[in-house]
């Protein structure tokens, strides 16, 4: 699974980023016989051009590119224009990325229920949300409204009362 780097990326390529890319790509056996090109962008955390098997990443000085961002952009390569094995859409891209591997739980998804968490609170929910994503993909086999189900499930989980109400009084047996 060769990775090609663009000329503009090479000067800022660190061994940390190289390792992150290799570890992430290893989670995508579908891309094993493809050459993926990695370049730079300043417009977003990342972008993808599935037709040309190319992703672009935003490199910041102080914060490494998250596995989530890399995974999200690789997942785009599996959507329309690319391999076409994952349904199109940004929310779908998040769901398939989170479901794919725990590696990609290191940063909050960009589109799925983004109003429900911040970068800081995401870590508390990440594993549960991934479980819900896996369940949603299972449900998708028989239920086209799996994303509606998933959003509702996540919302219930996040907004559930933290303190259990006392048990209702017995009826006096
Ligand atoms: Zn995207």
Image (cartoon, helix red, strand yellow):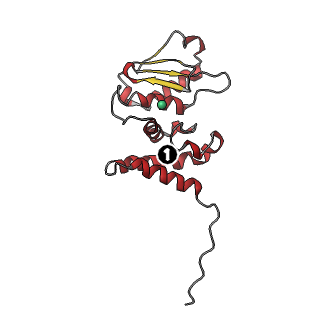
Residue placed most toward the observer, 48 or 26: 48
Q: Residues within 10 Å of mark 1 (few under 14, many from 20)?
A: many
Can you tell which quarter of the image residue 173 is in? bottom right
- Residue 137 left/right relative to 21: left
Q: Residue furthest top?
A: 7
x and y, in percent, of residue 96 in the image: 43, 39
Where is residue 6? Give x, y as percent.
49, 12
The residue positioned 52% from the left and 36% from the top of the image is 104
Q: Residue at x 56, y 22 (%)?
A: 43
Q: Residue furthest right?
A: 62
> Which residue: 39% across, 24% down?
50
What is the quadrant of the N terminus in the image? top left
Q: On screen, 80 above or below 96? A: above
Residue 2 percent across, percent down from the top left: 42, 18
Query: Measuring 42% from the left and 35% from the top, which residue is drawn there?
Result: 89
Residue 119, picture quadrant: top right
Q: Residue furthest bottom?
A: 173
41 to 139, vertically: above or below: above
* Mark 1, residue position: 130
Q: Position of residue 120 (x, y in %)?
A: 66, 41
Badge 1 marks a residue whose secondary structure is helix
Q: Give the vertical position of 158 relative to 111 (above or below).
A: below
Return the residue nearer the eye: 159 or 121.
Answer: 159
Q: Quadrant of residue 30?
A: top left
Asked whether mark 1 lies closer than 8 Å to ligand 1, one says no
The outermost residue toward the left is 142
Q: Which residue is nearer to you in this view: 59 or 143?
A: 143
């Amino acid at each position: 699974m060769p990775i090609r780097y663009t000329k503009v990326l090479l000067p800022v390529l660190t061994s940390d980023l190289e390792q992150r890319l290799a570890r992430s790509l290893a989670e995508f056996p579908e891309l094993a016989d493809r050459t993926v090109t990695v370049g730079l962008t300043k417009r977003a955390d990342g972008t993808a051009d599935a037709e040309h098997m190319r992703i672009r990443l935003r490199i910041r000085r102080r914060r490494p590119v998250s596995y989530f961002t890399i995974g999200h952009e690789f997942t785009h390569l599996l959507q329309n224009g690319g391999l076409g094995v994952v349904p199109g859409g940004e929310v779908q891209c998040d769901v398939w990325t989170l479901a794919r591997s725990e590696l990609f739980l290191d940063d909050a998804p960009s589109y799925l229920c983004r109003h429900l968490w911040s970068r800081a609170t995401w870590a508390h929910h990440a594993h549960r949300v991934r479980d819900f994503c896996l369940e949603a993909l299972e449900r998708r086999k028989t239920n086209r409204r799996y994303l509606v189900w998933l959003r509702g499930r996540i919302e219930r989980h996040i907004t559930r009362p933290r303190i259990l109400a006392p048990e209702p009084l017995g009826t006096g047996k």
